[in-house]
Amino acid sequence: MDKYENLGLVGEGSYGLVMKCKNKANGRIVAIKKFLESEEDKMVKKIAMREIKLLKQLRHDNLVNLLEVCKKKRRWYLVFEFVERTVLDDLEQFPNGMENSKVKKYLYQILRAVAFCHSHNIIHRDIKPENILVSQNGVVKLCDFGFARTMAAPGELYTDYVATRWYRAPELVVGDTKYGKAVDVWAIGCLVVEMLTGEPLFPGDSDIDQLYHIIKCLGNLTPRHQELFHRNPVFAGVRLPEIQQVEPLEKMFPKLHSITLNLVKVHLCLNHLSCEWYFTVFKSYLCRYFFFTGRFTPGVAGRIFPHLPRCGGSADLPGFRRLGVPPGGSPWVCASLLHPRGPLLIQGGCPFAARGMY
């Protein structure tokens, strides 16, 4: 590590800190994550090893690039490309929300990054504004894979306490250990609202308050999650919040476009087990067509974001068939996936169930 000059502290957390440094030989600016003494703390060692392993196998334009791994005096050091800003910096600069055009550019790249991870059977589990880096030319990089992990085999359990509370899916809050990619998709839904409004969607100051915010907006938890809540010793003697009247997204954010609200609803699925149908669409569709344009137009992402890395695809989506051209759009249905509430349609750039908006 002697070849790097420390230029200052960028951030710090429970398991270490991040420094801005310069390579003395070539002048390259990098970010170095310095972990606590990992040999003495099993949790720190586990997180460090997990991040190293996953980032070595994940290479993508919208994931932070791991350049080097070093170990010195029982500490692990991870050397990354340096990226100037985070989405959190933008939110602090624009407290009333970011411009729609900027949110579109960010979200498109976030979806690409997460879809890539999911295609490799990896869930991030800690998507939040400070873990999304943004370069000077607007390229987004998902970072901090300390809580990421590969998908569990059937019957295998996960750790329940992951993700920052405000972006934590309800299954995580109640202590479910059988969850999947839906926890990342939920976090993205929360992030979309926050980027557009400047306010966190579910700003709970405790786990029970987090559930209150979720139930107030989306209604009662699933029977399974209600049962897990009552069995969880963390909530012993505590009752689930009772809401007299639900305040849906439309009422909370009347200024947001209906297409945006429908997109958020797709992400905020209370029953994650019935939402696994969504992730094939998430990978094969959302990264090819940018749905905030309000129309189904092949190649639109490349025209809106010509400076960004291209994502392949054509009008002939594998596994999809065209249903016809009703007023307002060109719907397609996935031939192999049927949502419990009807076949999934892609219309006007927004996915929804055929028997009503999801």
Image (cartoon, rainbow, N blue to C red):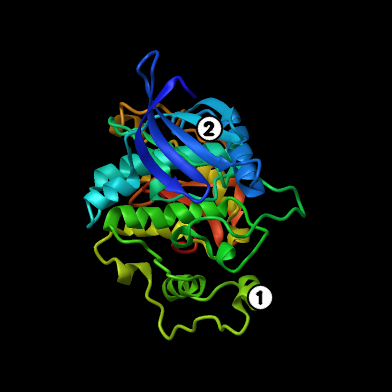
Q: Amino acid at mark 2?
A: Tyr
Q: Position of residue 59 (x, y in %)?
A: 53, 28
Observer-nearest of 171 and 81 = 81
- Mark 2 or 1: the one toward you: 2
Q: Is residue 93 left or right of residue 270?
A: left
Q: Residues within 10 Å of mark 1 (few under 14, many from 20)?
A: few
Observer-nearest of 81 and 243 = 81
Q: Is residue 335 left or right of residue 111?
A: right
Q: Which mark is residue 130?
A: none
Which residue, given by chain and number where applicable, does mark 1 sit on? 233
Could you say whether the residue bearing mark 2 is in a helix, strand or loop?
strand
Q: Residues within 10 Å of mark 2 (few under 14, many from 20)?
A: many
Q: Position of residue 279 (x, y in %)?
A: 56, 47
Residue 358 vs 55, above or below: the answer is: below
Q: Quadrant of residue 131?
A: top left
Q: Position of residue 173 (x, y in %)?
A: 56, 66
Q: Is residue 340 visible?
A: yes
Residue depicted at 22% across the width and 49% down the height: 93
Q: Earlier in the sequence, mark 2 or mark 1?
A: 2
Residue depicted at 41% across the width and 78% down the height: 246
Observer-nearest of 341 and 329 = 341
Alpha carbon separation for disc pair 2 and 1: 37 Å
Q: Position of residue 92 (x, y in %)?
A: 26, 52
Residue depicted at 41% across the width and 72% down the height: 217
Q: Which mark is residue 77?
A: 2
Residue depicted at 37% across the width and 53% down the height: 192
Observer-nearest of 284 and 315 = 284
Q: Is residue 334 visible?
A: no
Could you say whether the residue bearing mark 1 is in a helix, strand or loop?
helix
Q: Amino acid at mark 1?
A: Pro
